[in-house]
Image (cartoon, rainbow, N blue to C red):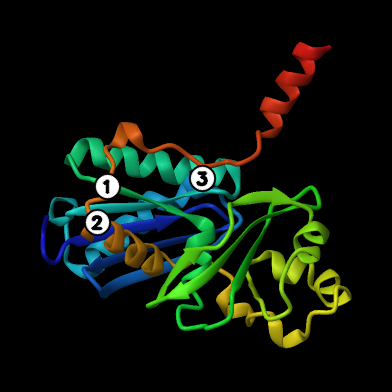
């Protein structure tokens, strides 16, 4: 294990593509792009630009980190495939990071429970509850995909909401009796690759890494294509 690993971390699980370079706990460079183009059109250029800015090469990296979902199916696949390809070429370990934990990292010092709501479309959210311990989110529940109404019906009154699903379902949250102050500010909802790197470093320090072939996306629910195939087979 390297004492101060150089980390490339990325997230493409939503419309925002976030990439960061860190040396252990120190942020070296970070960028976030919220573009209409697909991540496949800009991600490699985004990584290359950060490496140039930092004065690093791919050969300088020691550890790779990627958000494996849940989130946008195509985005997750692009991020995972990119990291796996780099890991195979560079022979580097990978740490897989949950999008839900990465969002919860945006509120590291909060004493109240955190409920992450990521918009899953189809009037559902990807969700999980966390409690912050020493600056890192510890799960209080299993990750799932469910209607926001069902999530809200089971939550304690002192919870704090964070994630891009908060803005989408703000009126429903308020309608269930939660105060506006229970919702984190908008700047806290997007995943930051530097936070992904911090979670990865924590796992790396405990020896929790994977080889490229072990890294798989976390979808939670089947994609539309899979549902269509199931319906065709049932028909």
For the residues labelled 2 and 1, the Cα–Cα distance comes to 6 Å
Determine the residue located farthest toward the left in the rendered image: 2
Residue that label 2 marks = 204
Residue 169 is situated, as x and y percent measured from the top left of the image, at 79, 67
Residue that label 1 marks = 209
Q: Could you tell me which quadrant the C terminus lies in?
A: top right
Residue 145 is situated, as x and y percent measured from the top left of the image, at 69, 49
- Location of residue 162 by image quarter: bottom right
* Residue at x 53%, y 83% (from the top left corner): 111
Task: Count residues near mark 2 (Cα–Cα under 10 Å), then give few for <14, some for 14-19, many for 20+.
Answer: many
* Residue at x 30%, y 57% (from the top left corner): 203
Q: Could you tell me which quadrant the N terminus lies in?
A: bottom left
- Location of residue 233 by image quarter: top right
Residue 149 is situated, as x and y percent measured from the top left of the image, at 83, 60
Circle 1 or circle 3, nearest the eye: 1
- Image check: 208 left or right of 44? left
Determine the residue located farthest toward the right in the rendered image: 175
* Residue at x 66%, y 34% (from the top left corner): 223
Residue that label 3 marks = 76
Q: Is mark 3 on a helix, strand or loop?
A: helix
- Counting residues from the N terminus, which is met first, the one under dot 3 or under dot 2? 3
- Counting residues from the N terminus, which is met first, the one under dot 2 or under dot 1? 2
Residue 57 is situated, as x and y percent measured from the top left of the image, at 17, 56
């Amino acid at each position: 294990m390297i004492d101060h690993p150089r980390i490339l971390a990325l997230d493409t699980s939503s419309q925002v593509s976030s990439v960061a370079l860190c040396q252990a706990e120190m942020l070296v460079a970070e960028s976030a792009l919220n573009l209409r183009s697909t991540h496949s059109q800009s991600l490699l250029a985004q990584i290359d630009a950060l490496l140039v800015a930092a004065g690093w090469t791919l050969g300088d990296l020691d550890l790779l980190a990627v958000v494996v979902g849940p989130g946008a199916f195509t985005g997750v696949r692009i991020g995972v495939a990119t990291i796996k390809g780099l890991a195979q070429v560079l022979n580097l370990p990978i740490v897989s990071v949950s999008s839900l934990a990465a969002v919860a990292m945006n509120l590291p010092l909060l004493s109240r429970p955190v409920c992450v709501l990521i918009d899953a479309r189809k009037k559902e959210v990807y969700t999980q509850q966390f409690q912050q311990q020493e600056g890192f989110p510890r799960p209080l529940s299993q990750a799932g995909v469910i209607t926001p109404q069902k999530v809200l019906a089971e939550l304690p009154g002192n919870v704090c909401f964070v994630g891009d699903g908060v803005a989408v379902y703000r009126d429903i949250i308020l309608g269930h009796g939660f105060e506006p102050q229970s919702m984190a500010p908008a700047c806290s909802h997007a995943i930051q690759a530097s936070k992904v790197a911090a979670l990865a470093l924590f796992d790396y320090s405990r020896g929790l890494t994977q080889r490229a072939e072990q890294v798989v996306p976390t979808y939670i629910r089947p994609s539309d294509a899979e549902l269509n195939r199931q319906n065709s087979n049932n028909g």
